[in-house]
Image (spheres, coloured by chain):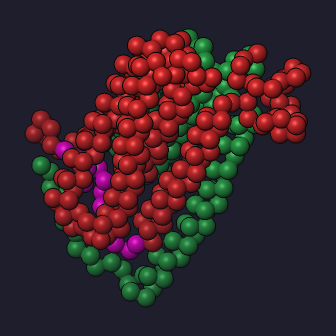
Amino acid sequence: MSDDGTQHPLKIYYIMWIGLFVLSTFSYATDFMADGALRTFLILLFMFIKAGGIIWIFMHMGWERWALKIAILGPPVAILVLIGLMSLESNYIEGSRIENYGESTMEVVSPEHH
Amino acid sequence: MSEAVMDSGAKEALGKEGLIEDWSRDKQVFGVPWGKAMMWVFLLSDTFIFSCFLVGYMSVRMATTDPWPNPSEVFALEAFGYPVPLLLIAIMTFILITSSGTMALAVNMGYRKNRKATFWLMLATALLGASFVGMQMFEWSKLIEEGVRPWGNPFGAAQFGSSFFMITGFHGMHVSAGVIYLLVVAFRVKNGFYENRPDGYKIVEITGLYWHFVDLVWVFIFAFFYLW
């Protein structure tokens, strides 16, 4: 291995650092500026870019050998199956709740600001 | 060739060929110190725990018929006379990112055997982490004062409180543990504990892995719980 991740110039960390600040500002801005599908898309987009950057650069995954990359990054893909199954199930539960108990009659108050 | 690759007879292949070689040859698979491999395995298991919490949160949020409280209103703070949505959460996010940056620099300084810089950068990371936990405590007290409980709240679906306390609480516990971990390693670096160890300052990188993971989890919590 020619590069074991120990002797990088600091520049790449500074770029990553600034990038995280900028992307987090964008994430935060979606709260004011975007709605609906665009908002969902942007939240996920910025989330994945930030997560990828942290894993690849800060956690040095980009410089590891593929044996480690596959062993660590492969298994979490199984979570997608869980997400899929649980969203089907939750949709069904919501439907049966509405069918049997009717729509929510909950009265809510708006949060006060201190 | 680095010292990290322990028993390398022939030239080491990279990429896909390297993947097959690492798993099929009669040698240890991961050419990294055992502490680093085990930290990655631990973080993998932690990934599944946090994923289960977040998927659980998704399930209860989708299944409830009650209106979900609007996070940008619940987590708003008054500043300059206006309620600013998610103000404290945004500050906490930036603090955690800053601490990730100082940690990345500490790892680099550790490999340069610059003990003093490593110590101060790790100390700064720990202090930023501690201030993050402090703000989380403030957030919790504010919400509890407003009547948010794990079993109900005045703003909407009861599941909001249980998800919030469970997820942020578990994350806060990780940050607190990380602060202690960082302080222990930082002071050992300062005292020269790692000077004559075979793995030397790799421990700083391993500590860094844990710390960056805490930041990584926050990226997902920020997106799914606070922004969604």
Q: Quadrant of residue B145?
A: bottom left
Please name whichever residue, B185 or A85, is drawn nearer the observer in this view of the structure: B185
Instruction: Give the vertical position of A88 relative to A60 (above or below).
Output: below
Q: Is residue A113 left or right of residue B36?
A: left
Direction left: furthest residue: B81
Q: Is residue A15 above or below residue B131?
A: above
**Residue at point 33% right, 58% down?**
B165
| B218 left or right of B108 in image | left
Residue A17 image point, x, y percent? 45, 23
Residue drawn at 25 percent across, 66 percent down: B149
Residue B198 can be seen in this image? yes
The relative height of residue B55 versus residue B88 in the rendered view (above or below) is below
B85 is within the stretch colored magenta: no
Does the stretch in magenta take in B65?
yes
- Residue B175 visible in the picture: no
- Helix, strand or loop for the magenta stretch, by majority: loop
Image position of B144 (left or right of A39)? left
Residue A73 locus on image (x, y percent): 66, 43
Residue at 40% x, 72% y: name it: B64
Chain appearing in red on the rendered image: B
Residue A22 picture location, percent across and down: 41, 27
Task: Give residue B39's position: percent from left, percent from top.
Answer: 58, 40
Q: Quadrant of residue B160?
A: bottom left
* Quadrant, the N terminus of chain B: top right
What residue span does the magenta drawing correspond to? B64-77
Q: Residue at x 20, y 59 (%)?
A: B144
Residue at the extreme bottom: A100
In-front residue for pair B188/A45: B188
Tally the marks: 0
Q: Colour of chain A?
A: green
